[in-house]
Image: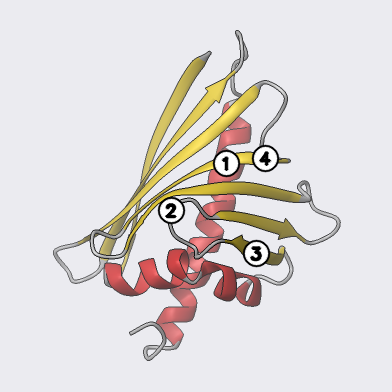
Amino acid sequence: MAVTTFTEENTSPLPPKRIFKASIVDSHNLIPNLMPQAIKSIEVQGDGGAGSIKTINFTDGGNFKSIKYRVDELNEETYTYKYTMIEGDGLVDNLEKITYDVKFEQSADGGSISKVTSSYYTVGDFKLKEEEIKAGKEKVLTMFKAVEAYLLQNPEAYA
């Protein structure tokens, strides 16, 4: 088994508390409403915290039907979120799991910096294709930007 790790940073004019609460804590409610063309629903088994299982169901006609992940850590004080994709179309045959470590930090201008570290655990000598990883990152960034746009247009939401 090999592990390939990527880290990506994005900035937002929003403070960490708002973007974390909307994009992470309440994602199962907010994101299907913001992106109904892509996400049919997000189901939560558990209270949403560590040990919970979340299933993202995509709309018909897309590349994926669903993905399932386990919440490993959710800390609303440090704005950290760790989860592991455990089932679904995002895991190809030669990929055991993908772990994500997300952290939102305050930036000097009052906004935030999000840091996401993704670790891909492959089976055997399987090599990940950079295009596939890039496509996945772009989908996540699109979701993040949709939440950010909503919060900028609705200053009272998640305040």
Q: Position of residue 137 (x, y in %)?
A: 53, 45
Nearest to the observer: residue 149 or residue 157? 157
The residue under label 3 is which amino acid type? Ile
Residue position marked by numbered label 4 in the rendering = 87
Q: Earlier in the sequence, mark 4 or mark 3?
A: 3
- Camera sees residue 14: no
Which quadrant would residue 91 be assigned to in this image?
Answer: top right
Residue at point 64%, 77% (across, down):
33
Residue position marked by numbered label 3 in the rendering = 42
Label 4 vs label 3: CA separation? Answer: 14 Å
The residue under label 1 is which amino acid type? Met
- Tell me the crowding category of disc 4: few under 14, some 14 to 19, or many 20 or more residues within 10 angstroms, Cα based: some
Residue at point 60%, 56% (across, down):
54
Position of 85 relative to 29 (above/below): above
**Contact, CB < 8 Å: mark 1 with mark 4?**
yes
Residue position marked by numbered label 1 in the rendering = 85
Q: Earlier in the sequence, mark 1 or mark 2?
A: 2
Position of 1 relative to 150 (above/below): above
Question: What element does badge 1 sit on?
Answer: strand
**Contact, CB < 8 Å: mark 1 with mark 3?**
no
Q: Position of residue 79 (x, y in %)?
A: 29, 60
The residue under label 2 is which amino acid type? Ala
Q: Position of residue 18 (x, y in %)?
A: 34, 75
Residue at point 40%, 81% (across, down):
152
Q: How many marks?
A: 4
Question: Can you tell which of label 2 and label 3 is closer to the viewer?
Answer: 2
Q: Earlier in the sequence, mark 4 or mark 2?
A: 2
Question: Can you tell which of label 1 and label 2 is closer to the viewer?
Answer: 2
